[in-house]
Amino acid sequence: MKHENSITVRHLTKKYGTKTAVDDISFDVEAGTVFALLGTNGAGKTTAVKCLCGLTEPDAGEIGYDTETGLRAPMDCREHFGLSPQENAVGMHLTVEENLRLMGKIYGVPHIPERTEQVLAQFGLTEERRTRGKALSGGMGRRLSIAMALFSRPKVLFLDEPTLGLDVLARRELWKIVESLRGQTTVLLTTHYMEEAQALADRIAVMQKGKIAAMGTLEELREQSGTDSTASLEDIFVRIMEGGSV
Amino acid sequence: MKPNHSTRTGRILALSGRTVTELCRDPLSWIFALVFPFLMLALFRLIDSRIPPEAGMTQFRPGNIGPGILVFAQNFLTLFVALLVSGDRDSAFLTRLLASPAVPAEFHWGYALPAMALGILQGGLTMTAVWLLSLTGGEALSFAGCMGAVVCTIPSMAFCVGLGILLGKLLSSKAAPGIASAVLSLSSFLGGCWMDVNLLGDVYAKICTVLPWYPAVRIGRWLLGTADFVPADAAVICLWAAGIHIAALLANRRR
Ligand SMILES: Nc1ncnc2c1ncn2[C@@H]1O[C@H](COP(=O)(O)OP(=O)(O)O)[C@@H](O)[C@H]1O
Ligand SMILES: [Mg+2]
């Protein structure tokens, strides 16, 4: 039971033409923990997420989900996933409520009306419930996009740059929500904000040019990069980037 | 807590419902699809009224032009289904749906079923107008025949919808409307919608009978008593309809 919904990734590689977007990465995510892929633009985070949730076929490597019925491939666990893509992914002509209910129907969530109220309240979207997707502000659209990913109470949640475009307060609220999932949901998030990885992640993988340059808890990263205990993740990050692979 | 459980039918219904909502709230394209046949009927009525009865030209009478307009208008479905599908492919919203338990075949029917419902509505309205027009022109058509024409051209309508999905899947949202409009224009000639295909020679006529449009027009005319029944027509349309849907179902380009 302990390892239920944990993720195992081995030698994952994805190429676009001659460009290797994800280059032989391996990592494990323990069930119920938060794992962050930290990296600058173009590091390969989104591509890795797409492979992990079965949207893209990798060129090489294995991805396994440890479930009640044994190790399974991404395509066989999609009903347990929640995905918040990098761009706001909401139906433009659907209202906030309709977007949420659509998720409920596609995932077959029981008691959709009650769940809708719950999620609207959780994300501070109750007042916007009848606003259409295209009329939402960037920040509200972001919230809805993440709310949709959580609607089905997924066992594994993928958040691709979740706080991009959110103001400080909304970001803190989202952090609280992610925090509340710890223990029940396995969360894989990507970010280029140091403080976000530092605040949320149990373990962090620093990605650079498709490879994992360093990986571990914040403490382990400190040790690996040879920085002292006062060093922030930013210091560590800079050290890793300058030094290349650790 | 009860676990999540979704069925194939449930997901198709959810996706269809979403298509209907998106269409209803972006009404320009489909209102055009519903209104355009009336404009054409009015135009041909005007032309017909200028032809002296002694000329004996029946080409533009409702019984002849009605099925032509019926089948021609079905091509508007190609246009806006192609727009919808190619537009969706550009959006992150589809990315999200593709990561859900819904599989490509369910998306296919989630687009096709609402579009076909709209097509039946379009056909019903068009042929009701044709029938009313025929009452005023001395050559009264049977209402049953008019509605029969709508039902019997459902396969060609299904073809148009399937073609729209295929174009939407293969082309970018910039290219799709252009190509679909080209198909729309072509169909009026190749379908003999308002001209006799035999006027352009035997070879041309032969080509028209193996494409889906002309056989559909001819079946419509047969139901209105203005053409003979050609058994091969039904087979040709059904083959095209089945073929295009299979092609559209198989065309799942994973990026
Ligand atoms: N669909 C695609 N086609 C071609 N190249 C791509 C595609 N998606 C990503 N790439 C390339 O792969 C690299 C990694 O991109 P991405 O995974 O989006 O990085 P990140 O999310 O870390 O910013 C980039 O160089 C990008 O240009
Ligand atoms: Mg990205």
Image: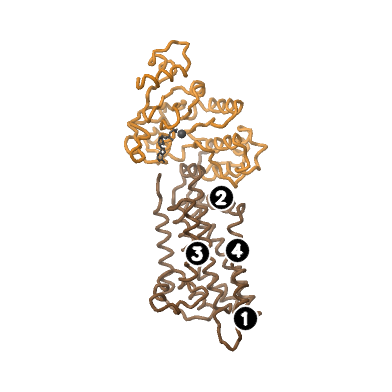
Chain colours: A orange, B brown
In this rendered view, identify the residue nearer to me: A51 or A211: A211
* Helix, strand or loop at mark 1: helix
| Circles 2, 1 touching at the beta carbon (< 8 Å) | no
Q: Which label sits in the foreground, 2 or 4?
A: 4
Frontmost of labels 2 and 1 is: 1
Mark found first going from the N terminus, 2 or 3 = 2
For the residues tagged 1 and 3, is the chain the same? yes
Quarter of image, res B146 = bottom right
Q: How far, Cα to Cα, is label 1 from label 4? A: 26 Å
Give a yes or no on whether discs 2 and 3 share a subunit.
yes
Q: Is residue A170 above or below residue B77?
A: above
**Of B99 and B86, which appears nearest the observer?**
B86
For the residues labelled 2 and 4, the Cα–Cα distance comes to: 21 Å
Three-letter amino acid code of the residue under disc 3 = Leu
Instruction: Tell me the CA gap for discs 1 and 3.
Output: 27 Å
The residue that disc 1 covers is B50
* Front label number (2 vs 3): 3
Q: Quadrant of the C terminus of chain A?
A: top left
**Label of residue B184 in the image:** 3
Of the image marks 3 and 4, the number of the one nearer the N terminus? 4
Q: Tag 3 or tag 1, which sits nearer the N-term? A: 1
- Residue on which disc 4 sits: B34
